[in-house]
Image (cartoon, rainbow, N blue to C red):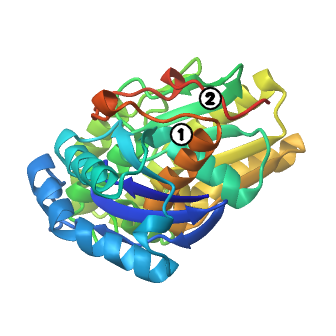
Amino acid sequence: MIVLGMEGSANKIGVGIIKDGVVLANPRRTYITPPGEGFLPRETAKHHRENVLALIKLAFKEAQISPDEIDVICYTKGPGMGAPLVVVAVVARTLAQLWNKPIIGVNHCIGHIEMGRLITGCNNPTVLYVSGGNTQVIAYSERRYRIFGETIDIAVGNCLDRFARVLKLSNDPSPGYNIEQAAKKGKRFYQLPYVVKGMDVSFSGLLSHIEKQAPKLIESGEYTPEDMCYSLQETVFAMLVETTERAMAHCGSQEALIVGGVGCNERLQAMMAIMCEERGAKMYATDERFCIDNGAMIAQAGFEMFRAGITTKWEETKITQRYRTDEVEVVWRDQ
């Protein structure tokens, strides 16, 4: 079975082709804004429109197949930014009509989870899903990916990105990556608010505090920008590891899987690995090819859905900015 997947929920536009669990092609492009700025829906959608057709052609060239060999077309239905999601949905609908193929709208979060399971080979992990728009601790139970804990305000990736704007760090390749590199040079730890509420976490107050204090502390010479990046990373990642460990204890899980764009962070992976080692568990993560939003993850989730007999009715091939992980019935898994 050969599946075409398209992702465009945020500032990445990606097209992936998967054949029976093997990635044949996975090109993507990123909309990068100037330092100190975020990305807005209209400009991001324009970027996706300008790049999507070239990426589809490139994906077919890399996969060395033709459109008539495709069995099903999959696209990100949500969650995400409205305008960029619409671009991908319109292209997917058009191709499905042109090539007379079935179509599947995929939940972005489940795309991350299924790609992580495929690449790492883990069986039934407790999942930490961390990105610019989402922060969730997830475990599978009774045909749903259940959310055991999540952020009650902003996502961890958004917290890191917004602090990168304060420091005017480059958005190339991503603000989170540049914070990670700066944090490696940090030596002094600055105490920040640590907000874990049961199984949930909160980053907005912590961000407000560091946004206010960092410029003064850096100007006085008491702390360096690298110290502040180090302090922020250590604090937010400790919160995430704590809640993940609690979910693992509740579920009796021996596997932890990190997915999402922030999952590329080597410090987060190292902290999670220490926790897992202490519990006699195993930590799984992927590199930036599959952690960061990409088309292959949508193709892989679509592959699992199509194999289980799921397609999306034509009148339901729309997008939704709010589409929770636990809304999807996971009929393709029996454990």
Residues marked 1 and 2 touching at CB (< 8 Å): yes
How many discs mark residues in the rendered view?
A: 2
Which residue: 48% across, 61% down? 70
Q: Amino acid at mark 2?
A: Val
Q: Earlier in the sequence, mark 1 or mark 2?
A: 1
Q: From the viewer's side, name the closer residue of 157 and 251.
A: 251
Q: Quadrant of the C terminus?
A: top right
Which residue: 23% across, 65% down? 31
Q: Callout 2: helix, strand or loop?
A: loop
Q: Which residue is mark 2?
A: 330
Q: Amino acid at mark 1?
A: Ile
Which residue: 34% across, 51% down? 96
- Could you give the CA–CA distance between mark 1 and mark 2, rounded to whole angstroms? 9 Å
In x, y percent, where is residue 333? Answer: 72, 33
Q: Which residue is mark 1?
A: 110
Q: Judge whether 316 appears above or below 28 on screen.
A: above
Q: From the viewer's side, name the closer residue of 192 and 159.
A: 159
Q: Callout 1: helix, strand or loop?
A: helix
Of tags 1 and 2, which is closer to the observer?
A: 2
Task: Say whether residue 170 is visible.
Answer: no
Other residues around mark 2 within 10 Å, as few (<14) / some (14–19) / many (≥20) = some
In x, y percent, where is residue 182? Answer: 42, 69
